[in-house]
Every structure is written in C-alpha cells, then in structure tokens.
Amino acid sequence: MDIASPADFHVHLRQGSLSELIVPHVKQGGFHLAYPNLKPPITTTEQALQYKAQLERIDPSIEYLMTLYLSPELRPEEIRKAHAAGIVGVKSYPRGVTTNSDGGIESYQVYYPIFEAMQEVGMVLNLHGEIPSDPATNTCVLNAENHFLPHLFKLHADFPRLRIVLEHATTRAAVDAVKSCGPTVACSITAHHLALTADDWAGQSFHFCKPVAKYPDDREALRQVIREGHPRFFLGSDSAPHPPDAKSTATPEKPCAAGVYTSPVLLPLVAHLLESFGALNRLEGFVSTFGRTFYQRPAVEGKIVRLRRLPQDKTIDGSYQLEGLSLVPFWAGKEMGWEIAN
Amino acid sequence: MDIASPADFHVHLRQGSLSELIVPHVKQGGFHLAYPNLKPPITTTEQALQYKAQLERIDPSIEYLMTLYLSPELRPEEIRKAHAAGIVGVKSYPRGVTTNSDGGIESYQVYYPIFEAMQEVGMVLNLHGEIPSDPATNTCVLNAENHFLPHLFKLHADFPRLRIVLEHATTRAAVDAVKSCGPTVACSITAHHLALTADDWAGQSFHFCKPVAKYPDDREALRQVIREGHPRFFLGSDSAPHPPDAKSTATPEKPCAAGVYTSPVLLPLVAHLLESFGALNRLEGFVSTFGRTFYQRPAVEGKIVRLRRLPQDKTIDGSYQLEGLSLVPFWAGKEMGWEIAN
C-alpha cells in the first residue's frame, strides 16, 4: 500500500540529546514532513530558523515547517518577516492548559493585529483548543475543549480568510464545530485519541495527555469523520516524548507528565487503527493529502512510503534508548498488523 | 468542638499485616464505628463473624458492623441467619467496575428473593453505583454512575421498604436521584470527593479512585447537600490503602491501583473540608447522626470525640509504616486546621 509522502502536522521534537534520539523517529515512523512544537517557545524568526537548522542537522531528509508562538511580544512586523522567511504558522496555547504552556494566551482580542497580519500574508493559526480549568465556570480537563469552541467560532467569524487549525480535537462537539465552519478551518487528530477513552488514562499515566481522551462517543466521532474522508480533518500526532520516570512515577506532590509518544510507529499504527474501524481506504487522505492541501504543501510526485500488511500481527518494541535516555512508545507490547516496507 | 461518636459507613480494613497497620487508624482518625469491605468477598455469616473477630483482636474499641457480599451463592436463608447474627447489610458491586469486584453482579433481577428477605428482616443494601464500561452504550468511568441511577430507581420502586445506600456518590445527578427517592434511600459521600475533581486525578494516581471524581459542578452538588444538612447524606470514607508502589508506579502493562487512603486523618480532614465550604455546622450530622439514624445505631450518650481548632494549620504526615509496609495518606504534605484533642 503506497502512501504519498506522509506529513505529521503536530509533533514535539524537543532539543539537545532528546532531539537526537527522537528526530530520526519521524522517518522511522514513515513521515516526510514535521510541523514541530518547542519549549521554550519560539517567538522570533531567527529562533525558528535556528531550530530548523538544528533539526536538519539531525535528519535533513525531513521537511520541517516552522512556527512562532503566540505571545504578547509578537508584532505584526515579525509576522511579515517570518512569512518572508518561510515560516508557516503561529501556535496558540491557553495559559496553563498544557505541558509547557506557561507563557500562553488569556484573551485573543489583544492579538487581533497579529491575526490581521497572518490573514494578509497567509499564515496558519494553530489553536490548542482548551480553556483553563475554573470551578466557577465548571471547567475542568473533561470539558475544557468544549468550552473553548466559542473562541474558535469568534476567531473564524472575525477572520474568515485566516486559516485556522483546531489541534488534537477529542470530542464530538469539536468535530461538529469544525465541520460547521468554512473551508479555512481545519482540525488535527492524533493517533492515540483514535484508540483511547477516559477509561484508558484513569490510573494509567502512559495514556495521560492533554487534551485527555473523553467518552466512547467522542472517540467514535473522530473515527466517523475519518471514515467519511472529510478533507479538513487530518493527522497531527502530538507525539510527545517523556522519559519513563516522568510518565510512570507520581508522588503526592508531583503528577505525571502529560504526553503520548507515537512517532516511531506512527504510520503503521494509524493504518492499524483506521483498519480497525473501517477507514483504511482513507489512510492517504488522513496522513497526507488532506493536511498537505490545507497547508498548501503538496506531496512531491513519486515520494511514497510503502506499507506492508504483515502475515501476522507483530508486537511493538517496548522502548527506545540513546545514551542513557529511554522512551516507551504508545502501543508498546501490543500488536500491529502493518510495517513500513521501504 | 465535640462530636458524638463518629461513624464511618464505608471503609476498607483489609486482612493480615495490612490490617494490623490500618485498623488502628480508624480510631486515630477519630471514628468509633466502621462498616468494612473485604476482599475476598464475604459470602457467609461465619466468614463475616470470623472477620469481625479478627478486627476486634486488633482494636476492640471500635464497633464493627458487618456485611455480606451480593453474589449468586447467597440464599434468603443465609440473609435470615446473618440478620440473626447481627450482620447489618449486603454489599453489591457491579462486575468489573471497581478494585476487587470481579465476582460482582450483572443483573439485579436474579437477586430479588434476597432483597425480599433483606426487606423483611431489615437489612441494608449497599450499592456501588456504577455500571461496567461499554462503548456501545457510551459508558466509561466518567458516566458509569449516571448510567447506574435507573437501577437505583427500579430497586427502590420494587422494594420501597428496603433500606438502600448509594455508596460514594460523585455526581449532581446521583445527589438529585437520592433526594428524589423516599426515606429508605440514603447516600454515602467520601471525604476525598469533597476535595477532588477530574483535574486532580488526571496524571496523579494518588487521587485516582473508583468512582473517579468528576466535574467541579458535581463536587459542588456534594458540598451543597452537606451544607443543607440533608439527613440522608452521610460520610462513608471508602478509605482504601494501597502501598505507594501500587499507587505511584504505572507501566504500559499495569495501571495504578484505585483507592484513596483517608482513615488516619479522617475526622480532622472532614472538619477542614466542611469548614472550607461553609458547612462546619453540619459536621456532627454528616459524620455521625445522619448515618447512625439511617443504620439505626444511635451514638451512646457521652461517647464523644473532641476536635480542636489549631492556632495555625499543620502539615499532614507523609506516610505510615509498620513492618515493611508503608502507606501515604490523602492530604499528605498539605495543611489542616484541626486535630483530635482527646
């Protein structure tokens, strides 16, 4: 099964030695394009280009699409400069919602001049669509995404030509919201949210990520929109490595790190999952064509990844090691029916 | 502040060496009466009396009210025998829902002769009010309690004189359901569900228990019903000890144990929590009078526990040790403003 140049439109590639371990996993997982996040946040064009150079030093065969981080320091001039330098998008994280988002946003109004400039030059706005928890509004991790959706509608109404991606959607409400918007609003879906529900991260930190997986019906909505081949819903793995210590060990003082690591097995895993819910025929759209079309980065003709159906399912490796670093991927110890052939 | 003979109407006291460590914590936590659970399940009067004797050997100053476990082996004759031997209730766990409930129930209809006998002799039915997860009905840990409530209504309609306790309620829907029932239906509430929401167990296994803590508005409903002093809502701590290893360390294969351990600090903790949401004047009702009235076990005149307001909050001990066993209690490392004076 040939897939045209798979693209992961949301992935954490880190820095330093961790980066050395995980950047090669993008290709190992079957992907040719990565749209990376970073902590500390990248707020200038220079930083973004430096980070791109670091990643290219590790694996130059991957196309890295770079972003800036939405913060009060950002100016419309920087947007125009970034666009001229080939930077593709701006990422927004509501303050305090996700791992490494301490510097995130509280209100979008203050950023309207930025969005104006982004709309003008054609940059993409990537939204971590959760509002901070607040007992006064009955907001917690379970409904933080649903409570964000009015912000999405307002941004889309105020900037109808601005391309917006609602990242790592986890709910039926989010799927319906994106569907109801115009062609400039799209949605990324992770691999793990196609597999997990709240039952899976209850007491199991290796499946704990933000946004948390929700109800079975929410998972079904993600599966449905892929089955129907909706072109504004595509893969963004949100693959995020944390050492097993940070994942497995909580203390009363310190919770586990949020994040699920899928990069090294991503394409076979997505094939396996899509096959499990009758959407294997949508694989190329979901992992390549739809996202590439929205981001205006068509696949280069002839650049393909070949997936091979295994005669029998094989068990996924338990961990990856490099110079004292160790990572346990999602689906470790479980079986999959696909592998990358070329 | 004097409290008449506090009673914990849901607590796990275990067996063997763990029992030796934790049974004394009932009194240390300020309680005179315990209504214990056990694994392996107690299905005969003899087993219940043996277990009672074991507990009394460890601390004879506590009044232990014993129960049987609802299972297909149970017969109406055993109910009458148990009642004659002073056994107070029968506990029901839907199959697979909670820790140690593998032998639980799947349908209540088969138990109707048991309930008939219980109603006749005046035994209490204790319900773990969750149905098993099932994607086909969109049921997961988040709504397993809400989906159980029709069973409560049906049991109450079919056995209006049977005293029923919906255990460890966590939702506004459950509170409203119990309120809407007649005087034979009551509800226990844990200490930790007065403090936690889903945010607190997301990635934090020390706060993971079944039923899981839900939305802020659900927590607020528990607080409200205590503030109003509703006599059919009383404390059942569901205090459940698990060694720190079982709580803190997940692997991809093995999730953490479910359970929160509150026994050693229970009464000061409940005072602290009730004070935090303006219900300190309901303390005696919540921890003693209401439950004792429902269970028809009035406090002995003059048996009191004296709570003292500390001049300043003190930090809760991090762990309890006995012969190689170790337990970390809820609220460890946090501050409380109350202690037991006598």
Image (tube, coloured by chain):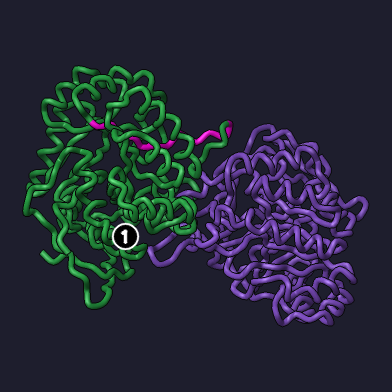
Chain colours: A purple, B green
Q: Which residue is mark 1?
A: B279
Taking depth in this image into account, of B41 and B227 the one nearest to the observer is B227
Q: Is residue B248 visible?
A: no
Q: Is residue A299 magenta?
A: no
Q: Which residues are magenta?
A: B124-136
Q: Is residue B129 magenta?
A: yes
Q: Specify the subunit that label 1 lies on.
A: B
Q: Is residue B40 above or below residue B316?
A: above
Taking depth in this image into account, of A45 and B143 the one nearest to the observer is B143
Can you give x and y, in whole percent of width and height, for residue B331 in the image?
32, 63
Q: Is residue A177 above or below residue A59?
A: above
Q: Residue at x 86, y 72 (%)?
A: A86
Query: Could you classify mark 1 by the number of other residues whose Cα lies within 10 Å: few (under 14), some (14-19), or many (20 or more)?
Result: many
Taking depth in this image into account, of A126 and B174 the one nearest to the observer is B174
Taking depth in this image into account, of B249 and A126 the one nearest to the observer is A126
Q: Quadrant of the N terminus of chain A?
A: top right
- Is disc 1 placed on a helix, strand or loop? loop
Hey, what amino acid is under mark 1? Answer: Ala
Q: Is residue B282 above or below residue B64?
A: below
In the image: residue B109, left or right of residue A241: left
Q: Residue at x 34, y 53 (%)?
A: B228
Q: Residue at x 48, y 61 (%)?
A: A256
In the image: residue A94, left or right of residue A251: right
**Number of numbered discs present?**
1
Q: Is residue A61 above or below residue A311?
A: below
Can you give x and y, in whole percent of width and height, for residue A313 in the image?
63, 36
Can you give x and y, in whole percent of width and height, for residue B4 in the image?
14, 54
Q: Quadrant of residue B155?
A: top left
